[in-house]
Image (cartoon, rainbow, N blue to C red):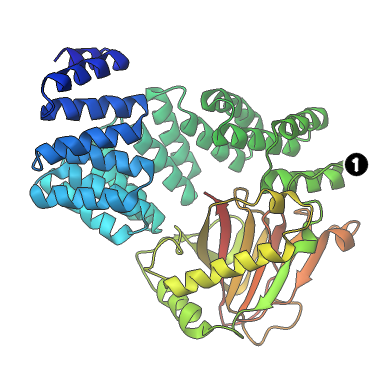
Amino acid sequence: NIGNVLKARGEIDLAIDKYRAALKVNLNHVDAHYNLGVALKEKGDLVAAIESLRQAIKLKPSYTQVGNALGNILRERGDLDAAIDCFLSIVNLNPNYDDAHCNLGNVQSDKGLLDSAIKSYYQAIELNPQHAMAYYNLGIVMRRQGKLDEAIENLERALEIDPMLVSAHINLGNTLKDLGKRDLALESYERALKIDAKNSDALFNKAIVLQNLGRHQEALQILASAKLAYGEGTRGHERTEELTLKSLFIVNHESSFLQQLERINKLGFTSALVGSICSRASLRYSVAIDNPFCSKPLNFVSLKSLSETVDFESLFIKPSYKLLRDKNISRLEQKLLVKAYQTSGNILGDDNYFSKTAKQIIRDEVEQYRKTYFNRPEGFLKYWPEKYEIYGWLVQYKNGGSINPHIHEIGWVSGSIYINVPKTLNDQEGNLVVSLDENVNDASIEEVSRAELVVRTGDICLFPASLHHSTTSFESEEDRIVLAFDVLPA
C-alpha cells in the first residue's frame, strides 16, 4: 500500500523498492507482482515489467486486469503476436471485459488485420456504449480503409462521449482535411489547441492546412511553435524544418530560405520535399545548390512492363475495378485533379483489396529498383529506409482528365501501375510527365528539367519522390485508371 501511494506521487523508484520488499516477505503476493510490473513499465524497463506481470498471471490466471496490462506492454515492445494471444486469452476468460476487446483491436490494427480490429471495437462498444476509445480507434481504422464518412461519424461519437479527447479532435481534422474540408479541419485543430495549446501534432497539422490554403506567413508562425513542441531530434521536428523551408521558398524570401536550407543540411537529414525544393531553387535562383536527396532525379526514372511477367488481369485489373465499384470507399476530388478522382485510405494496407501476392510483387519491384541503383552517390539511396510501408490509392480519369504537377512530400520513392490506358490514345495523350519543377511548360528550362513517358496498360513506373509528376490530358470514352503508390519510411 505504501508502494501504491509512492507510485501515485510519481516516486517510482521508491515504489519499486516497496513492492520488492513485499515480495521478500511473500513471494506469492499477486498484487505486489502486478504493481511492481506496472511501476517497472512506467520506469521504462519493459522486460522486467513483463516478467513481473507474468509471475502475477502464473499465480492467478483469472486476474484479467494483469493480462490486460501485459498485453499492452507486449504491444509497446512490438511483440504483436504475443500481445494478440494475451488479449485473446483475456476475452476468453472474461468475455465482458470491454477494455480488453478494445486493446485486442489495437493490436490487430497494428498487424494490418483491420476487419478483425473493427469486430473487436464493435464488441467493446456493444459491452460499453460509452467507450470513447473504442469509437476513436474505430474511426482511425475506418480512415485507413478509406471510409472517411464512417471515420468522421465514429470520431464525432468519441468526442460526444469525451470532448477533451485531444487525439480525436486532431484525427477528425485530418479526416476532414483528406476530404478537402480545410476550414472545418482548422476548427478541429483549434479545438484541440484550446485543450492543449502546445500539442505538437495539432500545431503541425494546422500549419499544413494553412499552407494548402496559401497562408504561408501564418503557417511559418505555427511551424515555429510546432518545432518547439516536438523538440530536437524527433521526426516531427525535422518535418517542421522541411515545411518551414517550403513556405520560405513559396513566399520567395531568398536570404531566409538559404539560411533555412543551411540549417537543414547541418541537422543532417534529407527528404523528398527538401530534394524537390533544392531542384526548384537551383532553377529559380540560377545557382548551384547541393541536393541531399537526389541531384539528378531524372536519371532514376524506371519504366517497364509488369504484365509480361505476372498475371496482371487477375492480380491488378480485376481487384481495381472491384474496388472502384465499392460504394463504401470515399472518393476524393482534389484541386490537382481535372475530371478525375482518387480513392481514400491505403488500399494496400490489408488484404481486402489486393492479394498478398500482388502486394509482394510491388514490394519486389521496389527492392529491384533499389538494387539497380544502390551504388549511385545519391542521398535517397544512401539513406534508404530500413523499414518502409507501401501506401497506395487508385486514380480514375474520365474523358479529358489529367493531374497537375505535384510531389508526394513524405514519400521516398513514388510509383504508378497502369491498370488501364485506353488503346485509342496517341503518343501525346495520357502520358506521364516527370519534372524538376512544377512549371513543366516553361520553354526556357523544358529540355533539361522534364521527361515525358508514353505508358501502356500493365506498365509500372518508379522514380524518386522528389520529382514533380503530372499527366497529359486525353480524349477517350474509356477511363484511364492508375494504381499510384508511395514508399513511406516507417
Residue 210 in the image, given as x and y percentages of width and height: 57, 36
The answer to whether residue 344 is above or below residue 459 is above
Indicate whether 427 appears above or below 288.
below
In the image, 360 versus 114, the foreground residue is 360
Name the residue rendered at 12%, 30% in the picture. Answer: 30
Image coordinates of residue 57 in percent, x first then y, are 15, 39
Return the x and y of residue 162 as percentages of the image width and height: 25, 33
Residue 400, image x, y percentages: 64, 73
Give the amino acid at mark 1: Val
The reply, left or right, for residue 33 in relation to residue 73 is left
Left or right of residue 474: residue 160: left
Q: Is residue 79 visible?
A: yes
**Residue at the spot 35% in from the left edge and 38% down from the top edge:** 168
Q: Is residue 157 visible?
A: no
Q: Nearer the viewer, residue 218 or 258?
A: 258
Q: Residue at x 56, y 36 (%)?
A: 235
